[in-house]
Amino acid sequence: MLRRAEIAAVIFDMDGLVLDTEKTYRIAWREAGRAMRYDLPNAFLEALTGLAIDAVLREIEGFCGPGFDTGEFNRLSAVCWRDYVERRGIEVKRGFHLLRDYLDREGVPFCLATNSTLINAEECLRLAGLEGVFATLIARDHVERGKPAPDIFLQAAAALDVAIDRCLVLEDSSAGIEAAARAGALTVMVPSALPVDAATAARCRFVLNDLSELLELVRG
């Protein structure tokens, strides 16, 4: 069960949860890799879901081995990503608008807490037509450690002035769920990649298909 009375605030992840950005990052990383003559398998890239960009780059550097130019890869992937999203935009995930409208009607405070940098998060929200939707935005720049450390969610709860154990964190990745669980929040997962491993599922109150399913749950 997940009762409305348990929830004093909601903390949204961004990539893969509110916005369908994870696939855009994977496309950009794969294209940048190809330009540098590295083959980055989709399964490997999917395993990077939810990590901050510094951790992503470390994983890719380790995968590609000695001689990998991290700076050039980062530059190329940024160019590839921007070209892709400027042409296609960024899709908002199913159920977000309905859930946001419900929270507004109920007077439930909410915010965004993302492993992305602030400048990247603001750009993604603009491209998705969500500029100004989140009055409070906690990004990787604002904390010492990114997810799976709990810092981002603890900072978000403090910004909302709500105890973390009364905050519902909505996440799509194992790293995000681990961070939320370590923070002591209520956790619901809407995975952007399947399957969900048993350890991650055990940390969640629910694992759902989309945000509209959450809306049905809290409505009762």
Image (tube, rainbow, N blue to C red):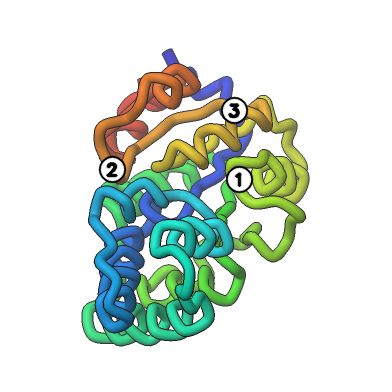
Q: CA distance from mark 1 to mark 2?
A: 28 Å
User: x%, y% of residue 215?
Assistant: 35, 34
Q: In the rendered image, which quarter is residue 7 located in?
A: top right
Gap in angstroms between the C-alphas marked 3 and 1: 20 Å
Report helix, strand or loop for mark 3.
helix
Q: Residue at x 39, y 64 (%)?
A: 64
Work out whether 121 lies above or below 92.
below
Seen from the viewer's position, the closer of residues 66 and 140 is 66
Circle on res. 218: none
Which residue is rendered at x = 70% and y = 51% of the image?
A: 145
Quadrant of res 174: top left
Which quadrant, please, contains the N terminus?
Answer: top left
Amino acid at dot 2: Ala
Residue 46 is left or right of residue 58, and the answer is left
Which is nearer the N-term, disc 2 or disc 3?
3
Q: Secondary structure at mark 1?
A: loop
3 vs 1, front mark: 3
C-beta proximity under 8 Å, tags 1 and 2: no
Q: Disc 3 marks which residue?
A: 181
Q: Amino acid at mark 1?
A: Pro
Residue receiving disc 2: 193
Where is residue 154 drawn, in percent x and y? 72, 41
Residue closer to the observer: 180 or 68: 68
Q: Specify the farthest residue to the top.
A: 1
Secondary structure beneath dot 2 equals loop
Residue 102 x/y as whole percent: 42, 43
* Residue drawn 38% across the image and 44% down it: 99
Amino acid type at circle 3 is: Ala
Which residue lies under the disc numbered 1? 109
Q: Nearer the viewer, residue 182 or 60?
A: 60
- Image location of residue 4, percent across then percent down: 50, 24
**Neighbour tally class for label 1: few under 14, some 14-19, many 20 plus, Cα within 10 Å:** many
